[in-house]
Image (cartoon, rainbow, N blue to C red):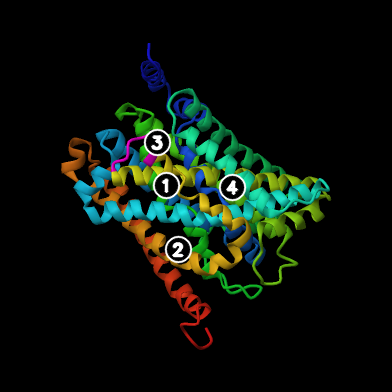
Amino acid sequence: MTTRDEELAWLADVARRPWLARQLAYLRRGGPGYLQSALTLGGGTASACLLAGAAFRFELLWVAPLGMLLGGVVFAAIAHQTLSTRQRPFDAMREHAGPVFAWGWAIGTVLSSLVWHFAQYSLASAVLVDLFDLAGMSVPRWSMGALVLAWSVVTALSFERTGSVRRGVERLMRWMVWTVVALFGLVAVRIGSADPLPIARGFVPSIPAASHGVDALPVILSGLATAVGVNMTFLYPHSLRERDWGREHREYAIADIFFGMVLPFIVVTSLLVIVSGATLADGFSGATISPVEAASTLGGLLGPVWGRVAFDLGLMGMLLTTVTMHMVCSGLACAQMFALERGSRGHRLATLLPTPGVLGSVFWSSLSVWLVVPTSLIAGALLPLAYLGFLKLQLSDAYLGADRPRGTRGALWVAGMALATLVVTVFAGLYAFERVPDFLRQLGLLQGAP
């Protein structure tokens, strides 16, 4: 039998089991949901969570899980649509939602993958320098950026191959995601259990008053923004089609979204906030805190080496997977926009478009002034556009036909997608209101105090 025949036989066997047994079978097998974790668990997520914990202890534990749960609703719809029709998502978006939605979605994917690559290299090189310092070796940051570049080029181009090489890279990503979970879990255990009541209350949405000179709203905006990126929504349906999944996989795909994307993200972000709130809040001065500074502080609290190494390795697991998937997303989006054949020279060059991000290992502090706010505004505006496009597809009889969810289930699904679209739209607007004036002042285009 072919590999697809074997998988269909496995699905048929699993379908005869009780619900819980089916979910456990899906968990053991894994799927493309882990690629979404590999993409979203990056430097932005780490920085947002550490700042939330240091400034507000456990009060903002709700932020990242809410962003991811709302995103999970949209991803479940993307899975249902893609597996029901088997149509290429960019073509479906252009035909049934409109070219504005399709092109905005693809352009946002490339732009966010290019610019946020700089920040990943900046943090990754700093973390590697910190690890070498622990070993008593002094290395320049640019050399660590070059090391990360070599990793990302090899893994990204290997990912675009077919057969065992691609499956090996996907398996590597899955194990790296759970390694990140385990490392941060070990740090949390090493710290010891905090009072469970404030932690439990932290998962109830609220907007606390300013603390340590930090306003809560920008931290909330950052946490929601780093949960689901527009490039994730482009990568996911492509991953489903690459695996040759069809309507038989719909239950499996939704379980995989939960186990591979939603659950690891919620666990990692919650652990980061709890660790930061339990150890960094008392000495926090109100300035921003970098993950490398946090690792150094935790090293002092947990032991001169153990805690710092575990935290640094957890960060590196997040960063290495993210830089790889940024490149994959860039190549994918360009290929679909410009009809590039997979594996062609044009496709490989598009995959390598984010590689100038290696300059972030040296110049990010000066580049960030020019890049962060404009990219956040554009990508933040295009994520709601993508969500709205998928909402239109979910309601399209011309696209889904008999597979369009109807009745109570269909209404609840649409309501969840509408809520997710509303939340990301409102917070994108609030982000613009908060950050644009400061950005203009930094460029000397606006005078006066904030």
Residue farthest along the bottom direction in this orientation: 448
Precedes in sequence: disc 3 or disc 1? 3
Left or right of 278: which side holds 273? left
Q: Nearer the viewer, residue 449 or 439?
A: 439
Q: Nearer the viewer, residue 76 or 180?
A: 180
Where does the image place residue 383, in percent across and percent down from the top left? 37, 56
Residue that badge 1 annotates: 330
The quadrant holding residue 173 is: top right
Q: Nearer the viewer, mark 4 or mark 1?
A: 1
Q: Residues within 10 Å of mark 3 (few under 14, many from 20)?
A: some
Residue that badge 4 annotates: 319
Helix, strand or loop at disc 3?
helix
Do labels 4 and 1 touch, CB within 8 Å? no
Instruction: Examine the structure image and report whether residue 342 is included in the region drawn in magenta.
Output: yes
Residue that badge 3 annotates: 239
Distance from disc 4 to disc 1, alpha carbons, whole Å, reads: 17 Å
Distance from disc 4 to disc 2, alpha carbons, whole Å, reads: 19 Å
